[in-house]
Image (cartoon, rainbow, N blue to C red):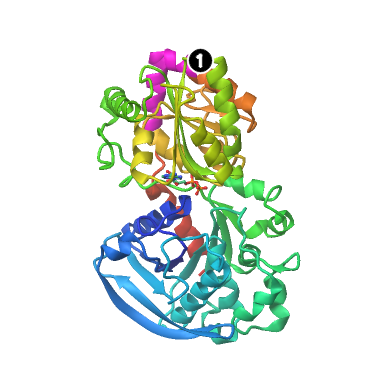
Amino acid sequence: MEIIHVSAECYPVAKAGGLGDVVGALPKYQCQAGHVAKVVMPMYRTKFLANNEWDVDFEGNTNLGDYFFNYTIIKERTNKLGFDLYLVDIFGLLDREKVYGYDDDTERFTAFQIAVVNWMSSWEHKPDVVHCHDHHTGLIPFMMKNCFAYRNLSFVPTVFTIHNGQYQGTMDWSKSKNIPEYDSWKWGDLDWHNSINPLASAVKCAWKVTTVSQSYMNELRYNSNGLEDLFEYERGKCVGILNGIDNDVWNPETDSYLHDNFKLSTVVSGKKKNKEELCKRFGLNPDLPLIVFIGRLVGEKAAEILPDAINSVLYNMNGQVSFLILGSGDPHIEWQLSNMNGNYPGLYHAVIGYDETLSHNMYAGADFLLMPSRVEPCGLNQMYAMRYGTVPMVRSTGGLQDTVVDMGAWEGFGIRFNNATVSDVHYSVSRAVSVYQDKTHFNWMRKHMMQIDHSWESTVEQYLNIYRSLK
Ligand code: ADP
């Protein structure tokens, strides 16, 4: 089967979160299963671009409304990532360093999608499925179905995966001029509440819709930033498939980012060494249980409760636990967390920014990983933590609920709580401190978690079954 993945992110080319990890791994494992999976994404000016070799695959031109543009598609020469990787260059729109965060993101991603569809429609053969990821590629199922110029793609099945339904790419109807000409009576396929909504459009137009966990699929019908009725209506074509993790990248035995590698039989000593190194670097007391947070500092992750929760814990449980934070996002939360540096010597440190190397060392050196998320479609952090023997402390939501079993249950290995509140976090920290002191139980949990199979190998088949069902 030939599968074309279209995405704004793909690790290690460009990553801002879990979307990048998934699109960097799923195609690789699809290829290993004997299929031809390809990824097409924008040609940002990243290190990966500069450090690898490329061939020009295609040169074309098309329109974004009145704006005529040329685009170039380049292909990575050596199949380095385990799949064919294509980058789309559009001068003046995609040639930027960052993935998101520009005032013209709407135009950038609309032009990217038009170029991808324009390119595919020029192929002599057609792929078996076009698999789009998140709202940045959400107009593609509509364009393949309804745009006059791309009628030759209308019979190609489309699958749309929602990694995060909170972001929908909504744009004003005045931007409809940017979309290639389509049957005007199909305007309803683009619309949601009087705006063009690419996420809603993809849910309407894609042949099949998936989300990255079963619980999140169910939650979207009650809490999806205004699309609840749509998910209720389209539930028949929606499926939840839990993400896997890339065990080639996330393996404590071989991870080249780690200060000290370790495996199941050396987990206790290996984690101790990594923890000592982390604590030395950030001035923390290595004798205390170390709780870390890694992630975007935004409301979805309940990051704004961290300052109060940590202050409350460190004030009331002084000297019993330490915290290390890595994240970036809301400037006010960044400011609050970094301002606390120095307030609790040996007990607290925050690093503001995005640091892949440090994140791996934190999964390896921490005792607990805190995720109080309000919304967590799948969550990869808790799965990385488990693979590195770090106990997840998570709010029971979305993929966190599907992957973490509370230590109070039979064979449980994590800590779960119900509310994104200071008191629930505080109570969970006290449970963490107690179990940390019970070394036999704690080490059993570590070893048990490390052996849980979250590999893509077992997940890939579920996607293939969906593609097969569309033929
Ligand atoms: P989301 O995609 O919602 O941000 P996920 O849990 O699906 O959340 O994926 C988060 C990914 O991004 C993980 O690989 C995590 O380690 C990484 N990550 C998030 N923030 C940072 C950061 N500040 N530095 C390094 N890695 C980060």
Residue 174 in the image, given as x and y percentages of width and height: 69, 76
Return the x and y of residue 46 as percentages of the image width and height. Answer: 35, 61
Q: Is residue 450 above or below residue 169?
A: above
Residue nearest the viewer, comparing 178 with 315: 315
Q: Find residue 254 and report its horizontal and vertical position in percent.
A: 25, 40
With 234 as the anchor, is 314 left or right in this view?
A: left
**Horizontally, is 64 left or right of 435 in the view?**
right
Identified by mark 1, the residue type is Asn
Q: Is residue 2 toward the left or the right of residue 77 in the image? A: right
Q: Secondary structure at mark 1?
A: loop
What is the chief secondary structure element of the magenta stretch? helix
Give the quadrant of the N terminus.
bottom left
> Pointer 1: residues within 10 angstroms few (<14), some, or many (20+)?
few
Side of 27 relative to 465 (left or right): left
State the image quarter where residue 135 is shown. Answer: bottom right
Q: Which residues are magenta?
A: 433-451
Task: Say whether residue 404 is visible.
Answer: no
Could you tell me if residue 150 is visible in this image? yes
Check disc 1 and report the residue beneath it: 318
Report the number of numbered marks: 1
Please tell me which residue is depicted at 39% across the width and 29% down the height of the picture: 366
Residue closest to the eye, 63 or 138: 63
At horizontal 48% and vertical 17% (from top left) the residue drawn is 433
From what the image shows, is residue 26 above or below residue 293? below
Q: 119 or 424: which is nearer to us?
A: 424
Q: Position of residue 153 (x, y in %)?
A: 52, 80
Where is residue 66, by image quadrant? bottom right
Taking the magenta stretch, the answer to whether it contains residue 225 is no
- The residue shown at (36%, 59%) is 13
